[in-house]
Image (tube, coloured by chain):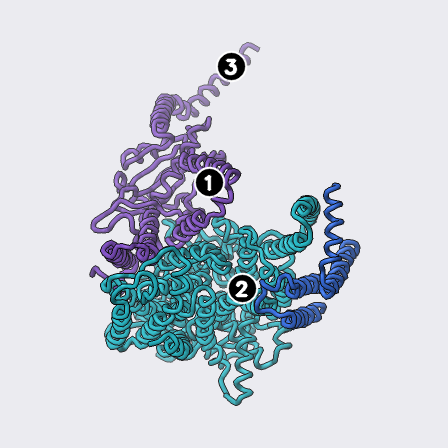
Amino acid sequence: MSTESSSTVARVLKPTILILIAIVAISSRLFSIIRFESVIHEFDPWFNYRTTQHLVKNGFYDFWNWFDEKSWYPLGRVVGGTVYPGIMVTSALIHNVLHFFNFPVDIRNVCVFLAPMFSGLTAFSAYLLTKELKDSSAGLLAAAFLGVAPGYISRSVAGSYDNEGIAIFLLVFTFYLWIKAVKTGSAFFGLLTALFYFYMVSAWGGYVFITNLLPLHAFTLLLMGRYSNRLYVSYSTFCAVGTLLSMQIPFVGFQPTRTSEHMAALGVFGLLQLYAFAELVRGYIPPKQFRALLKGGIVAVAVIASIGLTILSFSGVIAPFTGRFYSLYDTGYAKIHIPIIASVSEHQPTAWTSFFFDLQMLIFLFPAGVYLCFKELKDEHVFIILYSVFASYFAGVMVRLMLTLTPVVCVSAAIAYSTLLDTYLETSEHVLASTKPAIAAAATSAPVVIEATTSDSKATGKKTAAKAAAAAAAAAKSADAEAKTHAKSAASSEKKRFPIFNLDSRLLVILQLTWFLFMFAWHCTYVTSGSYSSPSIVLASRQQDGSQMIIDDFREAYYWLRKNTKEDAKVMSWWDYGYQMAGMANVTTLVDNNTWNNTHIATVGKAMSTSEEVSYKVLRQHDVDYVLILFGGVIGYSGDDINKFLWMIRIAEGVYPNDVKETNFFTPRGEYKVDHDATKTMRESLMYKMSYYRFAELYGSGNAVDHVRNARMPAEGPTLSVLEEAYTTENWLVRIYKVKDLDILGRDLKDSTAFDKGRVRKISSLKKK
Amino acid sequence: MAVISRTLFLTLLLALVAFLSASSSSTSSLFAHAQPQNDNEALLQKKVARLEAKAVKNKGVIQLDSLAFEDVMAKPRNYSMVVLFTAISPEFNCVPCLNFDPEYKMVAAGWSKLANKSQLFFSILDFKAGQAIFQKFGMNSAPSVLYFPASSSISGDPSQDRYDFGKSGFQAEPFAAWLQARSGVRVPVQRPFDFMGLAVKVLGTFTAVFSVILFVRKGRKIFGSKYFWSTISMIIIFVMISGHMWNQIRNPPYSMPSQQGRSGFIASGFQNQFGLETQIIAVLYSLLTGAAIGLIAVVPRIENPVGQRATVWVCMGMFTLVFSILIQVFKLKNPGYPFTLMFR
Amino acid sequence: MNDIKTAANSLLTAYIKDTPKSLKLIDSYMVYVLLTGIIQFVYVVIAGTFPNNAFLAGFISTVASFVLAANLRIQTNPKNASQFPTTSPERAFADFLACNVVVHFAVANFLG
């Protein structure tokens, strides 16, 4: 095959492979849909979904000024000013475009499939980014890696309609544009960087990562003495336009000029201006005079800057770091000062297992890639190095930031992997011609194909795995073609390099590497299907005979609420279910997952954890019509409200220390019990009563067992007088209670209930007679 | 007059006798009890002296067993007790016990430096030595700390004043604050002098000074050298991806004594790890990366075909071997993981 | 001090002698923008930043205009031609226009 024809083949192959990778990336995210159905997952996505619906129905202006009365009753929430609108606008746009072309796609499906679609785009932008760093074969590998890496899939499966779904694409693409801008020195690419930065700001709070990484790159280049006019053009365009644009998002507001985490960008901007001016002056006059001028200039600038900084920090214009961000630097900070941050599971630090689980073999090819970047060390490689170092630090501090690490791991692992392939597939036409290069090349590329096909047949059933592997193998093949053209230039510039002499060495390395690729693909499929694809609103459990049982109680309950309550019914529940209730049941909620008002949450906690009389007052004050709780005691669902009850108590105690005392809920032995040993306060609390109301009847005489806490319940269950049971789902997972109106006769509700019961008993006893 | 005075005297006398006889019971008991009370006093003083001696010997902490516990808690008591119920022995695998132990001792040591140290004693009751007491108090989790004020009588009733680990954590400082709320005395917590930290600091300063000197001398050479920077970045990356930040934040024990078939340096559980474990992982990762770099950068520089072949085989062998070890370690943490490379 | 004076003098003469006319035009524009920015800043120091968005919009628009003009100047400078192999002066001007359109669109939006 001549070089020319192989390059044409490569030209055809590349788009094909990219499309295949995109298909693999999308299809490996569809497990949850195949297994369950096309639903929105978890909690936050439900809010995004609801706002998107609002946006589609009422248009952009109404969305922008939306005051949501249905959440945080009676406070309400200004939605337009407190969200990152990027994802909603994106899906509304897609929806409208599709409808314009007469594709009547439901907005729900747009939302469900948004993250997988964008993952295809992410893979493509990883290709572009890596192509700028090495060559297109490395780019293809990076795209394949990023397409299936579980670290990214974890937040972008179908139905996981959350900000991160599009933000990672924007992150990678912004970085690509930035590198392109630095390389070409074009203001146009700087502008594009700024525009995509704006998109990113509108989509995810993680934009701060870009805000700090790009200035850092520019600053490092300055320190390395690599200032160039290209850097000036790209950075100052990006910074001026990007800062301005980012302030257009109401939720961000004036932060870019106020908070410290944005200051680095502005500082480097100023520095770059001065440097550029100095460079300009240097061009005009002899060095000696320039030095004199420079000294004078530095003194003047230092004086002005120090005066300015003192004034600014004294007058308090520059705010300190915000807590969430600060907790990244001082890792003990969140633990002590902001429990609400520390308590959220995705803000926990990352154990090494998570790294391996999410990235498998990439995690140790990644440092090798960084090493190779050091070897090349052009401007763009400096960027990748900085990105790797900082992202790995942040990913170590917070599990959630694995997301920002994953792209760079994929990129630099791809660089390492494709360099390996280059080295061991290289047909050495140059230096020290060996006797059998052609045979070696033919022999090495053949096994790759054979290996691919055999493993393909092995992996039947694991459809996506096979696909991924095939795509990767194809990438490897094109790497072969690419290597030829690339190796020439590389080898001539480097020190003396020799080809790999022995066929067996080549074979060994190539076969092993291919095998690792397969293992990686299997691993990714395993992780994706096993761990990252459950929607958490529909549960699946295995019965003893191995058949699958679908537990759909949540939707059953929400549907009941939607159909059987008034339009403006107020439903109280713990905040975890706020978004879901608003989204699925369309009722007014008191608190939801946007935990901005701690007092309000504590009030709900108080209503749940005090006795009926006390909480009835709270319920009446907040016009609550229904109370919704989760109870897992029947089927053993451990994430129910009794298990979360301690948090409610703790939060309530923080605000109402007189009404709620955590210690009263513990037995004298310091145990948290719900059975016979439960304390009086526990047994009288509304939550306990609601959970176990009529629970004993389900089992008959005294055999009631709570399967979550493995507790044998008393035969005599609690009685309720201010609430009445309204609905309990099939598996008792969700229970809904209606709050009684005040008694017509003005009696105490407790008395009236007792009276009613007495009457009922009398009547029934009369009938018997 | 005389008669009158005599009768008066008589009546007074009678009244006195009557009074005396009426109150005799109480006075007699007063006198009768005076002796044992003194005895008690002496006993108590002896006991306190004994406890003090014990406490002094052991840096403010008294090790108890079931008998000693009953003895110390027995009624004539003018001191408060803090008892740490714990299970230090390795077979119980009680990580929080191990974590809290030094903190507790630190507070005790701080207390023993105070003037009024005999007002409160710190004691430790290990499960091995005091199972009976554990049962008596219905203690089924360790560690727990109970506070017995001087006045309280001790009974099986477990409604004792208990330190809440869940709320306050295992650090010495909140524990000292808890004690302060009860005893009214501020307990100074003095972290033992951290020689390791000092060494690190001294070393750090030396390195800093040294590097400044170097920088002044041949700054461009060092700081312009990409080897310097690449070493630093690689170290940071390896430290981070092996979960070191988790250790920083969670402070797990460095390793555990190994027990039946479980090695002591790999923690069980997916979201748990030991200090040593992360170091092992970091070493495995760096071996793997090293092998990859060797294959990329070293092999093509070798002119001799035999040597080159050997290097390739060694590197690739190491790569595969270490990778399979890594997967095995991962399987320890995540038993359901289905894939293996070399070992079954 | 004397050094600086002579240096500044020679800078000035060199600038007047060596700079193409088009660049001087851009420079005068930049000086004008710079002065506008300084005036705005002084005004804000005196009168306060009350409509903060209006001030920011105005100030950032001057900063952005300055920077974009600087970009244009750098890219059209014949001395720098070797650094920008892909950017012709016409291309540079088109970029300049595009950036300005975006910036002033945002500024208009931000003025409120």
Q: Nearer the viewer, residue C9 or B159?
A: C9
Disc 2 residue type (three-letter)? Lys
Where disc 3 sits, the SS reads: helix
Instruction: State how far apart marks 2 and 1 are (Cα).
Output: 55 Å
* Residue at mark 1: chain: B
Q: How many marks?
A: 3
Disc 3 residue type (three-letter)? Phe
Where disc 2 sits, the SS reads: helix
In the figure, the shade used to draw chain C is: blue
Q: Nearer the viewer, residue A414 or A751?
A: A414
* Residue lying furthest top: B2
Compared across the picture, whether A368 is left or right of A624 comes to: left
* Residue B165, x across and y down, in percent: 41, 47
* Residue B239 visible in the snapshot: yes
* Residue A550, x across and y down, in percent: 34, 76
Please tell me which of labels 3 and 1 falls first in the chain. Answer: 3
Instruction: State how far apart marks 3 and 1 are (Cα).
Output: 71 Å
In the figure, the shade used to draw chain B is: purple
The answer to whether marks 3 and 1 sit on the same chain is yes
Q: Nearer the viewer, residue B233 or C2?
A: C2
Q: Nearer the viewer, residue A742 or A97?
A: A97
* Residue position for label 2: A183
- Residue B72 drawn above or below residue A566: above
Q: Disc 3 or disc 1, which is closer to the eye? A: 1
Q: Which chain is cyan?
A: A
* Residue position for label 3: B9
Instruction: State how far apart marks 2 and 3 are (Cα).
Output: 125 Å
Q: Which mark is residue B173?
A: 1
Where disc 1 sits, the SS reads: helix
Q: Quadrant of the C terminus of chain A?
A: bottom left
- Residue B133 drawn above or below residue A739: above
Disc 1 residue type (three-letter)? Glu
